[in-house]
């Protein structure tokens, strides 16, 4: 396909694609899917080789958020039966982070629900960052995700030892008001800019599957390129029961792969991360995503369970990739404790479109519980 040859050539030269080219990727057929993945893989390998970066989420404070983001199980008015707890103590957060690092994670992502951090919240998170630094030194990256930032907070987090800050744009500016009314798109973009100005590596991505158009997906991808973010998490909607988007199962594995490829062609030498919802929507095609994206989350997500951490590592090895920063093969495990094996409730849908009938597995282990985390 001339389109794909052009996109590979532009990707290797870091020349941005046109909007029409990005839209054309999303319009390709299922028969062309492997060609699309192979072309995106050429760009991915040019900048990242066969490395896969592992990231690990630690939910510092779960639920009871005052914002009304329609996709979120922690939103105002959510009836989702998720874990709800207040701030983890630094030692509790460190224990969760240690499990992820032991599983191979190179970055720990410290996340807290809420509109944005108070100065006291920044102090709390700074204490947790210090605990991780004391344990792991500079060998582990720390990313904070605390909501909308106020002036000066990014610099304080950087001084405390944070490396990065995540705040997703989620969707296009034109449709943002359709998914949230308690803050707007400009608030989110401003926080991404504040993160960079404060010395933090900006991490920002999107959520696909909320009813958006191809134009919306292309708009947000180009907006992320314009913001010059360093990493782009691509989430696929997990339609929790008890949220306004419950029952919204619009994605197929093929569609999810095309979205990832489009993001790779737009954000060519940027870390592209397959994030929340990959098990549910990519299902058995997850290994193909590694040919496009160079980063994944290990283990569980904020409020839902991922596939066993050991399965993530096996998938990476079986697909011919290597964990970034790995120095040795991880020890064999028996599916307990840090091995990260989930039970039969792991959040995986079957291969049919009737996957909507399979309930999302709410996270019941790791941070905020007495059970070992999944890593």
Image (cartoon, rainbow, N blue to C red):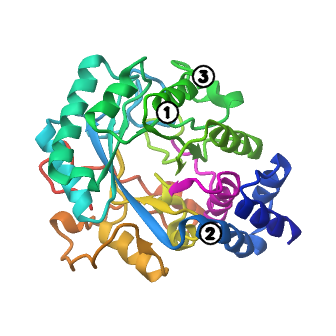
Q: Tell me where residue 335 sits by quadrant.
A: bottom left
Looking at the picture, how far across and down is residue 331, in whole percent? 21, 78
Q: Earlier in the sequence, mark 1 or mark 2?
A: 2
> Residue lying furthest right in this view?
2
Give the mark nearest the N terminus, 2 or 3: 2
**Residue 262 located within the stretch drawn in magenta:** yes
What residue is rendered at 45% in x and 66% in y? Answer: 52
Callout 2 crowding tier (Cα within 10 Å): few <14, some 14–19, many ≥20: some
Label number found at residue 186: 3
Q: Quadrant of residue 90?
A: top left
Can you tell which mark lies on residue 196? 1
Magenta region, residue range: 246-273
Q: Nearer the viewer, mark 2 or mark 3?
A: 2
Residue at 35% in and 31% down:
113
Quadrant of residue 228 in the image? top right
Position of residue 19 in the picture relative to residue 138 (left or right):
right
- Looking at the rendered image, the disc whose residue lies closer to the viewer, 1 or 3, is 1
CA gap between label 1 and label 2 equals 26 Å
The image shows residue 371, relative to residue 115, as above or below, that is: below
Residue 43 appears left or right of 133:
right
Label 3 crowd (10 A; few <14 / some 14-19 / many >=20): few
User: Residue 168 vs residue 186: left or right?
Assistant: left
Are discs 1 and 3 less than 8 Å apart at CB?
no
Residue at left offset 32%, top offset 26%:
156
The mark found on residue 46 in the picture is 2
Q: Residues within 10 Å of mark 1 (few under 14, many from 20)?
A: many
**Quarter containing the C terminus:** bottom left
In this orientation, does residue 64 appear?
no
């Amino acid at each position: 396909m001339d389109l794909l040859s052009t996109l590979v050539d532009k990707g290797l030269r870091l020349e941005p694609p046109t909007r029409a080219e990005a839209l054309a990727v999303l319009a390709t057929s299922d028969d062309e899917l492997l060609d699309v993945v192979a072309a995106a893989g050429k760009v991915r390998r040019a900048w990242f080789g066969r490395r896969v970066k592992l990231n690990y989420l630690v939910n510092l404070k779960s639920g009871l958020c005052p914002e009304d983001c329609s996709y979120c199980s922690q939103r105002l008015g959510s009836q989702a039966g998720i874990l709800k707890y207040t701030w983890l103590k630094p030692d509790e957060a460190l224990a969760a982070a240690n499990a992820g690092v032991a599983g191979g994670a190179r970055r720990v992502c410290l996340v807290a629900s809420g509109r944005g951090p108070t100065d006291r919240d920044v102090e709390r998170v700074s204490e947790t960052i210090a605990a991780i630094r004391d344990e792991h030194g500079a060998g582990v990256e720390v990313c904070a995700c605390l909501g909308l930032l106020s002036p000066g907070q990014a610099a304080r987090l950087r001084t405390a030892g944070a490396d990065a800050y995540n705040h997703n744009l989620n969707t296009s500016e034109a449709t943002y008001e359709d998914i949230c009314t308690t803050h707007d798109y400009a608030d989110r973009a401003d926080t991404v800019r504040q993160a960079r100005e404060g010395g933090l590596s900006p991490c920002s991505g999107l959520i696909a599957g909320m009813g958006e158009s191809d134009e919306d997906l292309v708009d947000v991808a180009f907006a992320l390129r314009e913001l010059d973010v360093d990493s782009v998490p691509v989430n696929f909607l997990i339609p929790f029961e008890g949220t306004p988007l419950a029952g919204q199962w619009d994605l197929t594995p093929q569609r999810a792969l095309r979205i990832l490829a489009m993001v790779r062609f737009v954000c060519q030498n940027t870390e592209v991360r397959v994030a929340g919802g990959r098990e549910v929507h990519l299902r058995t095609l997850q290994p193909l995503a590694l040919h496009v994206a160079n980063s994944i989350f290990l283990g569980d997500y904020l409020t839902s369970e991922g596939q066993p951490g050991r399965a993530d590592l096996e998938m990476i090895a079986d697909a011919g990739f290597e964990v970034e920063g790995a120095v040795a093969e991880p020890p064999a495990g028996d599916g307990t404790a840090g091995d990260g094996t989930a039970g039969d409730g792991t959040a995986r849908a079957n291969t049919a479109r009737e996957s909507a009938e399979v309930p999302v597995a709410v996270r019941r282990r790791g941070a905020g519980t007495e059970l070992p985390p999944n890593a």
